[in-house]
Amino acid sequence: MRTFAIASYSLYFLAGLVITTIGSVMPQLLAHYEQSYTVGGQMVFVSAVGFIAGVPISAWLMRGLKKEKYVLALSAVIIAIAQLSIWSLPSFGWVVALNFMNSVGAAAIECVVATLMMEVLVGRRAVVMSYLEVSFGIGALCMPLTASVLIANQAWQYSFFVTACLGLIMAVVWCFISFEKERSDEAEPLDANIAPPPMFKNNHMKRYILFAFVFLIFIYSGIEGSLNHFMSSIFLTHLEVTPYYASLSIGLFWMAMVVGRAATGWIIRKVNYAQYLRWSMFGTLAVIILFALCREAVVGFILVIMMGLTMSGVYSITMVYANHTFPGMARLVTSLVTAFAGFGAAVFPALIGYAMDHSGTVSALWYIAGFAVFYLLILLLGIGRFYRHQAGVALNECK
């Protein structure tokens, strides 16, 4: 299982590289093809549609290929082909199509690996997902840092070449990986003790709570996706820094993400899922508001680090919280979470790109803050209220 775990973390590292490649060189890519930020947002939308399509495609491939490792190897090959082709700088239409294909591969990787973890490591889902997310974050951190060096040397397109090479390596590795599904070792660190899964009185309530979780992921992924793809552009237009330092802003964001996700495995053994999500999103909202009001580059970089820390574990803990609420439904819940994560990452950046072109960067930041408010409302008034009601019912039955 150790080899399997390392290979899984490596795939999440690859996915982290993939998700930030376009965003890291977005200004240079749009300038090369003489396109606007609105078109950039539309390109991100098409990419995210590919991510959504990758979820059912991965399920279909698993039925056809039977073994998860072959699906993962094929996904890595798809990413390698797409990235290598973009590196050659074909016509813009081909770039959009190849980025769509690239996202299909990334979605398959995230969906298959996360589902395996949810099914196998039930008692420590949050801890293991935090490790996976750390790997993802390191990849998302390395790409902007790599891109900034390449941009400084007028070779920004080689960002795609780097990811293509790793994709080919991972495809070969996964052809030889062997593993067995087994229960987690009780000696390993477990998640915090939390309330048992709720008892649903009817399917209507069950669908309502499932939809609430899916909508949380939709909103959060929209926030993260908007920041991933437009952070450097926001620094260029809002704080007026040079392209080199603007690209580094994404690196700082993901550096903070990595640190926060590494800490999540420890924090989640001290607090429950709801508490973690509540304070994380309150912190995120406060930092985004401060960033919208900020006009100093140094303060902006500090706020970006704080934003990465507060957002670091929201995606993985939301997924784990959903799987805890619906035991025995890991494949359905994880697939829905992954698909709507892609949907959020499609819709929101398109809106933010349009807002940046037509109403300015500050307005776009206020829209992102509004998304965080929606997340908190659903978490507190929807899911939180339902769990509080369940706790009250359980207490009355004990009496």
Image (cartoon, rainbow, N blue to C red):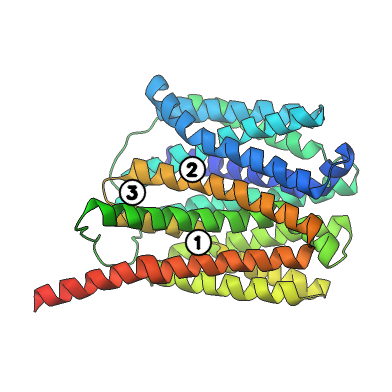
Q: Residue 170 carries which label?
A: none
Kindly report the distance in space between the C-alpha atoms of the residues bearing marks 3 and 1: 19 Å
Q: What residue type is labelled 2?
A: Ala
Q: Which amino acid does label 3 sit on?
A: Leu
Apparent side of residue 7 relative to residue 44 in the rendered image (left or right): left
Q: Which mark is residue 121?
A: 3
Nearer-N-terminus badge (3/2): 3
Examine the rendering and report whether any part of residue 107 can be seen.
Answer: yes
Residue 312 screen position, x and y as percent: 55, 62
Report whether 359 appears left or right of 187.
Answer: right
Q: Mark 1 points at which residue?
A: 314
The circle on residue 339 is 2
Q: Mark 3 or 2, which is nearer the eye?
A: 2
Comparing 30 with 160, the one in front is 30
Provide the secondary structure element on which disc 2 rests.
Answer: helix
Disc 3 from disc 2: Cα separation:
22 Å
Image: 230 above or below 279: above
Can you say whether 186 is above or below 164 in the image?
Answer: below
Q: Is residue 286 above or below residue 166?
A: below
Which of pointers 1 and 2 indicates the residue nearer the eye?
2
Within-10-Å neighbours for mark 2: few <14, some 14–19, many 20+ = many
Q: In which quarter of the image is residue 231?
A: bottom right
Residue 112 on image: x %, y %:
44, 37
In the depicted view, which residue is nearer to us: 272 or 180? 272
For image coordinates 32% across by 52% down, the residue present is 207
